[in-house]
């Protein structure tokens, strides 16, 4: 599944366009690598998301679009959450 779509369906970001913008500025990484909105997300991947005040690291548990839309599976597990200084860019 596309990364931007996964972020929206997993409810990590409110809108897909916001997800695309975050990815394009480098605020989202898959397995510690920079990526594009169309990058593929698979079960077991680690996704890091830099929000303005925190950095969230999650493990992808479900990458099936149909299940995520119906909310029939748990989409991710939080591995780490840490505060970020808004004056500094985490990446």
Image (tube, helix red, strand yellow):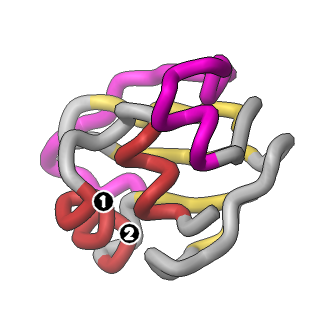
User: In the picture shown, does residue 65 fall above or below 80?
Assistant: below
Q: Quadrant of residue 2?
A: bottom right
Left or right: 21, with 58 as reference point: left
Tell me which residue sits at (66%, 60%) in the image: 30
Assign a secondary structure to mark 2: helix
Q: Nearer the viewer, residue 54 or 78?
A: 78
Tell me which residue sits at (22%, 31%) in the image: 53
Disc 2 marks which residue?
23
Assign a secondary structure to mark 1: helix
| Magenta part of the chain | 65-91
Tell me which residue sits at (45%, 23%) in the image: 82
Q: Quadrant of residue 68?
A: top right
In the rendered image, the residue lying farthest to the right is: 44
User: In the picture shown, does residue 16 fall above or below 8?
Assistant: below
User: In the picture shown, does residue 41 fall above or below 71?
Assistant: below
Quadrant occupied by the N terminus: bottom right
Residue 89: horizontal and vertical position, in percent?
A: 29, 58
- Is residue 61 part of the magenta span, yes or no? no
**Circle 1 residues within 10 Å: few <14, some 14–19, many ≥20:** many
Disc 1 marks which residue?
19
Left or right: 1, with 10 as reference point: right
Does residue 47 appear anywhere in the picture? yes
Residue 43: horizontal and vertical position, in percent?
A: 81, 44
Label 1–label 2 contact, CB within 8 A: yes
């Amino acid at each position: 599944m596309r990364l931007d779509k996964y972020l929206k369906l997993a409810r990590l970001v409110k809108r897909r366009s916001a997800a695309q913008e975050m990815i394009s500025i480098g605020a989202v990484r898959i397995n510690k690598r920079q990526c594009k909105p169309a990058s593929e997300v698979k079960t077991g991947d680690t996704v890091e998301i830099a929000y303005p005040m925190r950095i969230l690291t999650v493990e992808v548990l479900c990458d099936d679009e149909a299940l995520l839309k119906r909310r029939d599976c748990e989409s991710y597990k939080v591995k780490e959450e840490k505060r970020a200084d808004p004056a500094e860019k985490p990446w």
